[in-house]
Image (cartoon, rainbow, N blue to C red):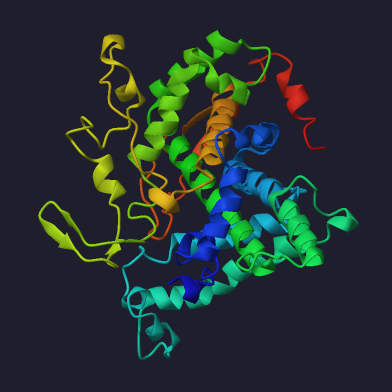
Amino acid sequence: MGKQDGMGSDFDVSSLGPRFKAHRAHLQSAFTKGSVVQYRGIQEQEARQALRTITQRPENWEIALRRFASAIVLRVAFGITLENDDDEYVKIAADAIHATGNGGSPGATIVDYLPFLGNLPYWMVPSPTIRHARKWGSAIQRLHDVPFAAAQKENEGVAQKSSYVYSLLEKHAQKWVAGSRERFFSMKDINGSAAAIFIAGSDTTFATTLVGILNLLRHPTIFHKARELLDQTIGLHRLPSLKDRDNPKLLYLEHIVQEIVRWRPLSPLGIPHKSLHDDVYNGMFIPRGTSVYFNTWAMSRDRALYSDPDRFNPDRYLPVEQGGAGEPYLKGPFGFGRRICVGRHLALGSVWIVLATLISTVDISKAVDLDGNEIEPIVGFTTGLFEVVILFILIVDLDPVRRGGVFAWVWGVGG
């Protein structure tokens, strides 16, 4: 469905070949585990901006988290800083998330295997997925066009020179002058790879954070255990930073993040791969060129690896000698092989810092009905390339006593 919804030029859905290799090379160098350390300041600042919004307008917690996810990738990819929660780019990201999150599972339609059918009138191929793709394809196109156009205006002060796009535009201009432009990395390719960062980065960060909030709401003992560890480790005089993620005393927070991506893999079937040669798996012959999907959902529910796999339990990763089950982190929540999500290190760091910041500072609780009874959140997800949790209602309470004067400092962030 890539060409139907406007994603045909994006890195994740492009065919293997010189163009794919060029995209991959540029993205890998920018988002290695070591490279993303340079973005920690951005992640921390945006997490505190989210906290600022939530403390001032608790009912807008979902808007604050959506802005958080979009703001990080916009600054990293395009050098664009969001001005407020109602910024045009937040709407662009929200529409793109709707487009990819509600378009059906990859490989679920006949158009995935016979692409020419996508060019026929709807009445000839009455697929809801095709209808959705055509209706929302413009959202993906706006995601390509609007931020990239702004990034190209760097000389007018719109974008920052430290961004992914700016560095590639500089290289492109230099090679144009030298007459040695990369054949497979045109302006369109720069646009497509940056758009892939935007949509994949904002989608995964926002959706993963929502799954985390949902489970902290459903399991208050986990929330309070994490808060107690944060209080004991960093005290009440400051907010968490991403340097704290390396502290072994806070490994429980890492377990929470890893349990989020195991408990509900965002892309249960992921991006389709193709077998490079004839192969045999469990007695089944797989010819060369066969479309292959990895079933991350089945891996996450493998009872040989995970006891009670439907239960959200960060303690499962603790070594046996520490009272845990010694179970492994899930393999493949961000894909496999050459199509593995290059932004996974950035995304996991973003989820860690925003959850740690919120756990440290605010209380969350279930909403209540008119009779005072708690309303259990409904656990439901959209179906698409990325699965997004259906929004739920929660109450956010601010406790200004916690962390002393930190809140006065937070309120000064971004304004």
Q: Horizontal placement of 177 versus 41: left or right?
A: right
Above or below, 289 relative to 394: below
Compare residues 337 and 136 and report the one nearer the observer.
Answer: 337
Q: Residue at 65%, 69% (x, y): give it.
A: 188
- Percent across and percent down for residue 139 are 59, 68
Where residue 74 sits in the image (x, y, percent)?
A: 68, 50
Whether residue 162 can be seen here = yes
Which one is nearer the viewer's eye here, 20 or 160? 20
Q: Is residue 373 visible?
A: no
Residue drawn at (57%, 28%) of the image: 358
Specify the quadrant that holds the N terminus: bottom left
Q: In this view, does 226 lie above or below 143?
A: above
Number of numbered discs overlaid on the protein picture? 0
Identify the residue shown where x is 33% and y is 23%.
Answer: 317
Q: Outermost residue toward the left?
A: 283
Vertical arrangement, residue 299 with respect to residue 176, above or below:
above
| Percent of width and height locating residue 397 | 58, 28
Position of 308 compared to 357: left or right?
left
Could you say where residue 348 lies in the image, as x and y percent from the top left? 51, 36
User: In the picture, residue 219 is in which quadrant?
Assistant: top left
Q: Looking at the figure, which quarter contains the C terminus?
A: top right
Residue 268, above or below 323: below
Residue at the spot 28% in from the left edge and 47% down from the top edge: 297
As rendered, which of 34 and 97 lies closer to the eye? 34
Q: Quadrant of residue 377?
A: top left
